[in-house]
């Protein structure tokens, strides 16, 4: 089935073009909002060739298609079949009323996670690319130090270029966060980016010194310094900006709005941001890093093994509940404070455990002649090896349930090893084999060994637990 044929079927099964109010995609899913969920043919969508999973939450529908395919099918749905990418200001009062009621029924914690996801998910391609470039630059530097590669000429230029490209995003991560936060909170995007830029401005050190808030001997212990509060502070600062900007705009004559509103909004927000928000969120971030260090970076091998196992084993349920988006700020805080991310490599083992579980299920499916399940696993495994686990979650392990649990149990062994060996990453993104490139050079081998351990443990535990009858009847 071609992508066009698949797109046409999905639009039809969603109640037609007129029943869809918004369409978009993430890395592996086509996401749509529908007017009437009763018109959606869920069973038909699940049986459609190419569909790896289906998740519905009221009027919000997510169809798992896998990496690459999700983007292509979504583009066809929007550009060729006419689904609306965004529909703002066109709904009638009844639609608005239903939307407001729907928002009121949402769990506040769930809304915060959704907000964080909307801020950071669009940045993931840049995060991955920057991490890869920084990782390769670091690897070249290591090989130059070992005199395997020349420190001058071609390899010097490559190392500098890769560092330049990687730093082009990660060096200004706060600005991008500010822009995306402004989109979520309804502030002017450029002003949101300016708040992010303020957080990393060099003048903060001079301001901090004047007010006696800077510790010259240990800059990181300063009450106020460049980058204090990290991206958490930026998000809070932009939220305040949105409130201030709306308040001022209502009170400024239209003829002066373009000049006065952004000036006053930034002035008021910057004062609050620099002297209140950055120190407070900095204190919270420092506390979080300290707690994580006790657990994640412990020198006690027993603590490392136990915490690594538990974190890896529980990560798949977190993905299922959408809680994994709440970890992105923690990754960013670690990257800012430690120069690398230790939590991400541990949690990445969850996907490897699931790959092992899927391989075990495949052997059983082959024995009981379940060709449909074999086909689903064959289609989802490549993405799983590359660290995109959703096709396996929603197409294989979760429908059988037991393998969803055994995958986590197997992943725990890899997580324990990765935690014990203090693996550190340059960035975060899809895990699996592709993430080897974003690990610190001295962590690459141990990360790979952790993956292998998770593959094997996930396979063995699942093979021991799963029954032929459970696979045959799925």
Image: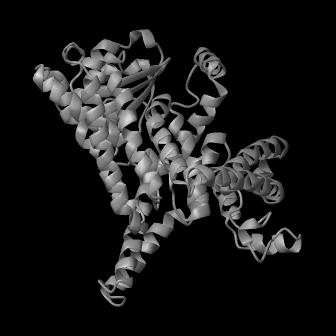
* Quarter of image, res 378: top left
In the rendered view of the protein, which quadrant contains the C terminus?
A: top left
Give the x, y percent position of residue 274: 79, 60
In the rendered view of the protein, which quadrant contains the N terminus?
A: top left
- Of residues 41 and 156, which is closer to you in this image? 156
Give the x, y percent position of residue 422: 47, 58
Q: Residue at x 80, y 63 (%)?
A: 223
Q: Residue at x 50, y 41 (%)?
A: 311
Horizontal side of residue 372 vs 140, given as left or right: left
Does residue 348 appear in the picture of this structure? no
Relative to 60, does residue 327 appear above or below in the rendering?
A: below
Does residue 246 appear in the picture of this structure? yes
Residue extending farthest to the top is: 38
Q: Residue at x 33, y 20 (%)?
A: 399
Q: Residue at x 50, y 17 (%)?
A: 58
Give the x, y percent position of residue 424: 47, 60
Residue extending farthest to the bottom is: 152
- Of residues 203 and 2, which is closer to you in this image? 203
Relative to 337, does residue 78 appear above or below in the rendering?
A: above
Relative to 402, does residue 163 appear above or below in the rendering?
A: below
């Amino acid at each position: 089935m071609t992508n066009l044929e698949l797109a046409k079927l999905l639009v039809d099964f969603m109640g037609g073009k007129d029943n869809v109010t918004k369409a978009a995609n993430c890395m592996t899913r086509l996401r749509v909002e529908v007017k009437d969920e009763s018109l959606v043919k869920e069973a038909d969508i699940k049986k459609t060739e190419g569909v790896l999973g289906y998740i519905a939450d009221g009027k919000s529908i997510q169809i798992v298609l896998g990496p690459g395919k999700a983007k292509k099918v979504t583009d066809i749905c929007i550009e060729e079949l006419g689904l609306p990418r965004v529909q703002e200001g066109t709904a009638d009062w009844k639609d608005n009323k239903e939307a407001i009621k729907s928002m009121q029924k949402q769990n506040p914690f769930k809304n915060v996670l959704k907000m964080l996801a909307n801020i950071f998910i669009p940045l993931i391609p840049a995060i991955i690319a920057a991490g890869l470039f920084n990782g390769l630059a670091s690897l070249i530097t290591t090989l130059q130090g070992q005199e395997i590669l020349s420190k001058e000429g071609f390899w010097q230029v490559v190392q500098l270029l890769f560092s330049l490209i990687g730093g082009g995003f990660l060096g200004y991560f706060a600005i991008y966060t500010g822009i995306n936060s402004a989109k979520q909170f309804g502030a002017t995007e450029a002003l949101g980016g300016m708040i992010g830029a303020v957080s990393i401005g060099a003048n903060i050190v001079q301001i901090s010194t004047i007010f006696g808030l800077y510790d010259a001997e240990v800059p990181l212990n300063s009450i106020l310094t460049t980058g204090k509060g990290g991206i958490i502070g930026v998000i809070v600062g932009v939220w305040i900006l949105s409130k201030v900007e709306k308040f001022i705009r209502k009170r400024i004559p239209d003829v002066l709005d373009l000049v006065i509103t952004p000036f006053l909004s930034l002035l008021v927000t910057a004062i609050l941001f620099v002297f209140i928000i950055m120190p407070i969120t900095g204190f919270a971030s420092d506390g979080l890093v300290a707690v994580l260090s006790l657990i994640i970076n412990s020198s006690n091998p027993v603590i490392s093994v136990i915490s690594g196992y538990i974190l890896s084993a529980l990560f798949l349920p977190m993905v299922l509940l959408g809680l994994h988006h709440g970890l992105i700020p923690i990754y960013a805080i670690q990257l800012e404070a430690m120069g690398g991310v230790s939590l991400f490599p541990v949690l990445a083992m969850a996907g490897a455990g699931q790959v092992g579980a899927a391989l075990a299920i495949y052997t059983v499916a082959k024995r009981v002649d379940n060709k449909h399940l074999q086909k689903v696993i064959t289609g989802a495994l490549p993405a799983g090896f590359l660290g995109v686990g959703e096709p396996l979650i929603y197409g294989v392990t979760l429908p059988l349930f037991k393998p969803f649990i055994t995958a986590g149990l197997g992943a725990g062994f890899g997580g324990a090893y990765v935690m014990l060996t203090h693996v550190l990453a340059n960035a975060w993104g899809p895990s699996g084999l592709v993430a080897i490139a974003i690990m610190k050079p001295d962590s690459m081998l141990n990360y790979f060994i952790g993956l292998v351990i998770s593959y094997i443990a996930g396979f063995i535990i699942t093979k021991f637990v799963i029954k032929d009858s459970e696979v045959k009847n799925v």
